Image: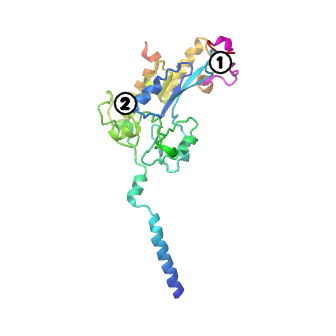
Amino acid sequence: MKLNFKTFALCLAAGALLAACSEPPEIAAKAAKRPDVAPYMGADNGFMTKGWTPGDLASWTEAINKRNQNQSEYSRVK
Amino acid sequence: MARMKFICDTERCIECNGCVTACKNENEVPWGITRRRVVTVNDGVIGQEKSVSVACMHCSDAPCMAVCPVDCFYRTDEGVVLHDKDICIGCGYCSFACPFGAPQFLSKGAFGSRSKMDKCTFCSGGPEANGSVAEFEKYGRNRLAEGKLPLCAEMCSTKALIGGDSEVISTIYAKRVSIREANGRYPSNDIFGWSTAYGPSGSPAPTPTPADKIPGAKS
């Protein structure tokens, strides 16, 4: 019985000491990866290009691919 | 879904460093950090000097992601490799793992202390609200969300550097190569591939230019 009390006290002490090693939830939340917003959702500023609808993936892809062709002089110079 | 990539045409790059300047200005990159740089090989060797603009290649199997101890990297649906600066601890492992030297750190004083990692974001910001001030201050501009492409590629004067959906830019590049072949330059190369971009595998090693042909050089 005496040994059991000793073990219990030891466990309690170890638990109290190890509590210092834990990570508070607010710190753990900071270290978690945050989801990024997809570019086709658009940007909340005054630099948006025209010709596509924010939130519409198909129109964004089309606009980007069209803009991509500006890098080909064979498309730009007719 | 698009898979964003850069291609640099070494036949066109004139080492003007316009892409480097555009990147620094657009993203307000601090002194000491260069997200993009131009590397020249065979410098001064007549006819064999080639330049290539290098930044983060947004690898499909990125080694920086593999070695990061705090797992701050993520890949977007567009294939862009980004990282969260709020998680980064500035350990520098990614810098050792990257074969292109893309991850950069600011020296912040004595004893080699470093800042958090900074690298090319393909002008697509980071994990903050698109186009927000917080995103700009941490990661730079988010041009993709504005319907634009990275400025370094868009403003390249010779269109050596092209960036965008890999399918589209490889088609643009393949057309150039086929026209070069039709004009008698680099015949019998593959239509697209490593040998097209950087010369065939059997290319002879460059021979140094004789000193008497270099103005001001001593033999």
**Residue A5 x/y as whole percent:** 50, 84
In the rendered structure, the residue with mark 2 lies on which chain? B
**Residue B104 x/y as whole percent:** 50, 38
Residue B12 falls within the magenta-colored stretch: no
Residue flagged by tag 1: what amino acid is it? Answer: Ser
**Residue B119 x/y as whole percent:** 47, 37
In the rendered structure, the residue with mark 1 lies on which chain? B
**Residue B131 x/y as whole percent:** 34, 37
User: In the rendered view, would you say B13 is above or below A47?
Assistant: above
Residue in the picture at 58% in, 12% down: B182
User: To which residue does mark 2 refer?
Assistant: B147
Magenta-highlighted residues? B198-214
Quadrant where the C terminus of chain A is found in the figure: top left
Instruction: Give the mark, 1 or 2, whose residue is nearer the N terminus.
Output: 2
User: To which residue does mark 1 refer?
Assistant: B188
Residue in the picture at 54% in, 41% down: B95
Residue in the picture at 57% in, 17% down: B178
Residue B113 in view here: no
The mark found on residue A27 in the picture is none
The residue most toward the front is: B110
